Image: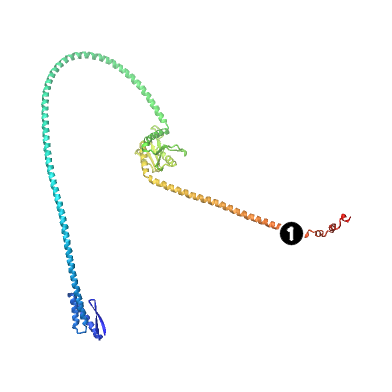
């Protein structure tokens, strides 16, 4: 017996049959019916579909009761699950409704509290508005009262002043009447006095005429005397004026003979006085002195230098003062001194060069103020004496702004100098060490050579000593072997007889 598995709604069903062919036909028919039922499932519930499938299968008179039983069980399970789901849905709906009611109640409470707070605020604001309106009304009433009081006071004062004015007018009218009366009396008295004076004047005039005539005669004589005195004075002053003109001419001639150096020194003194008057207030740490160093053959007039608190010089100016008299025969130009001024500036290590000049007085180019002539020589200016202090201030303030850069540059230069000195020290050490090493090496080689030479000499001495020892040994051997009477008297029979014959003493 064979089994065939069929899946319906996720559940597996097995068909059994002894006839495999019939079983497969049944499976095919069942699959077709399942497809048919699937097409109908769009408008039917799952339970209806399962029951319909089970009934449809059961209508076939096959021995497949297990399918129907399982379908019924599945339908019951589906119904139980659907009831549980519906119950769960009802419970969820009830819980949702209860939560919504709770939320609605909380919202209503919050809304009521907010409304009560808003109503309280509105009540307070209305109270405040009422208070303000009351205060405004009281202020308005006070204002009206004050206005009324002021008006009444003004009217009272006006009435008082008008009464005072009327009284003063009446007083003045009475005074005028009194004065008119007094005037009439005075006029009558004056007329009488005039008549009296007229008679007296007539007599006085006659008397004065006589006196005038006398005075005219005296005045004529005085005029003559004065004219004589004026002539004498004019002659005296004419002589004195002539003498003064001659003295002025002498002074002009003397000034014309003055050297340019002396005239320039006058301008130098002027500039020095200007600077010294401001030295302690504007330039307390500055150096401003005459240039007395003429080792190079020339020198400027003044040198200005200023340094910071840490000793870094941030500005230096070489000044040259030039002036000449109007009557000087040889007229110089400012350009004649540019080259020498630039040379002095470079030799004295100054940053700027300034020519304070009174030359070319009619030249508009130099009369405009501070003239920059850097197009000819770098950092050179030509000024009139009145711009002496302003130019120093301008250059000083400009240089002070670059003090930090100069400080960093000085530090870099110092570091570079230190590095150069360090490298020089290293180079000097290497050179000295190399020299000493070379000398030591040469001495060592010389000592080695001398030792080698000494060894050679000692070897020669050793060889000589060994040779001498050998010769002494040979001599000793020869002395031992040959120094006998027999060998000595060999080939000398007379000597041998002499040594072998007895002496006369022996014979006697």
Relative placement, left or right, of 463 versus 221 is right
> Residue placed at 16% from the left, 57% from the top?
111
Secondary element at tag 1? helix
Q: Position of residue 164 (x, y in %)?
A: 12, 29
Of residues 147 and 408, the one drawn nearer to the viewer in this rendering: 147
Task: Look at the picture and state if 484 lies above or below 189.
Answer: below
Between residues 322 and 406, which one lies in front from this camera angle? 406
Q: Quadrant of residue 9?
A: bottom left
Q: How is the image coloured?
A: rainbow
Which quadrant of the rendered structure holds the C terminus? bottom right
Q: Residue at x 40, y 36 (%)?
A: 321
Q: Count how many numbered circles sit on residues in the image.
A: 1
Q: Image point 18% across, 65% down: which residue?
A: 96
Q: Is residue 301 visible?
A: no
In the displayed orientation, state which residue is furthest to the right. 508
Residue at image position (42%, 47%) is: 411
Residue under label 1: 474
The quadrant in which the N terminus is found is bottom left
Q: Residues within 10 Å of mark 1 (few under 14, many from 20)?
A: few
Q: Position of residue 322 (x, y in %)?
A: 40, 36
The answer to whether any part of residue 196 appears in the image is yes
Name the image quarter holding residue 72: bottom left
Task: Give the percent coordinates (x, y) of residue 143.
Answer: 13, 40
In depth, the one of 382 and 277 nearer the eye is 277
Residue 72 vertical position relative to residue 483 in the rendered view, above or below: below
The percent position of residue 429, horizontal first and vertical second, equals 51, 50
């Amino acid at each position: 017996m064979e089994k065939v598995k069929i899946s319906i709604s996720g559940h597996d069903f097995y068909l059994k049959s002894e006839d495999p062919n019939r079983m497969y036909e049944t499976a095919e028919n069942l699959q077709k019916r399942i497809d048919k039922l699937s097409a109908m499932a769009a408008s039917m519930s799952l339970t209806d579909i399962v029951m319909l499938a089970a009934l449809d299968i059961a209508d076939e008179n096959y021995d497949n009761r297990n399918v129907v039983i399982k379908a019924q069980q599945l339908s019951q399970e589906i119904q139980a699950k659907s009831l549980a789901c519906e119950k769960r849905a009802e419970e969820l709906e009830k819980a949702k409704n209860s939560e919504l009611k709770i939320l609605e109640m909380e919202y209503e409470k919050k809304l009521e509290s907010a409304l009560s707070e808003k109503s309280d605020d509105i009540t307070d604001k209305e109270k405040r508005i009422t208070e303000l309106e009351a205060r405004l009304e009281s202020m308005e009433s006070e204002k009206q009262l004050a206005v009324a009081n002021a008006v009444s006071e003004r009217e009272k004062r006006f009435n008082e002043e008008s009464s005072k004015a009327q009284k003063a007018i009446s007083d003045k009218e009475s005074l005028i009447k009194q004065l008119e009366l007094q005037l009439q009396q005075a006029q009558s008295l004056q007329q009488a006095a005039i008549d009296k004076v007229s008679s007296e004047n007539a007599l006085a005039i006659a008397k004065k005429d006589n006196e005038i005539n006398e005075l005219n005669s005296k005045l004529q004589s005085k005029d003559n005397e004065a004219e004589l005195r004026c002539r004498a004075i004019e002659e005296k002053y004419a002589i004195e004026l002539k003498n003064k003109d001659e003295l002025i001419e002498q002074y002009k001639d003397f000034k014309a003979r003055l050297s340019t150096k002396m005239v320039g020194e006058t301008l130098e003194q002027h500039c020095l006085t200007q600077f010294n008057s401001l030295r302690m207030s504007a330039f307390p740490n500055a150096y401003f002195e005459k240039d007395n160093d003429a080792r190079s053959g020339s020198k400027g007039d003044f040198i200005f230098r200023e340094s910071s608190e840490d000793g870094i010089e941030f500005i230096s100016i070489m000044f040259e003062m030039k002036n000449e008299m109007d009557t000087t025969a040889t007229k110089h130009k400012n350009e004649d001194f540019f080259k020498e001024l630039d040379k002095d500036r470079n030799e004295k290590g100054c940053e700027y060069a300034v020519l304070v000049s009174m030359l070319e007085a009619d030249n508009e180019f130099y009369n405009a103020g501070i003239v920059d002539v850097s197009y000819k020589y770098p950092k050179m200016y030509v000024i009139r004496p009145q711009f002496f202090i302003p130019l120093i201030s301008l250059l000083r303030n400009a240089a002070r702004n670059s003090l930090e850069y100069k400080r960093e540059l000085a530090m870099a230069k110092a570091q570079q100098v230190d590095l150069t000195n360090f490298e020089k020290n290293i180079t000097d050490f290497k050179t000295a060490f190399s020299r000493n090493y070379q000398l030591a090496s040469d001495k060592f080689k010389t000592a080695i050579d001398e030792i080698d030479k000494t060894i050679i000499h000692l070897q020669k001495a050793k060889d000589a000593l060994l040779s001498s020892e050998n010769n002494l040994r040979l001599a000793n051997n020869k002395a031992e072997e040959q120094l006998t009477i027999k060998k000595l008297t060999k080939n000398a029979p007379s000597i041998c007889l002499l040594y072998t014959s007895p002496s006369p003493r022996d014979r006697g």
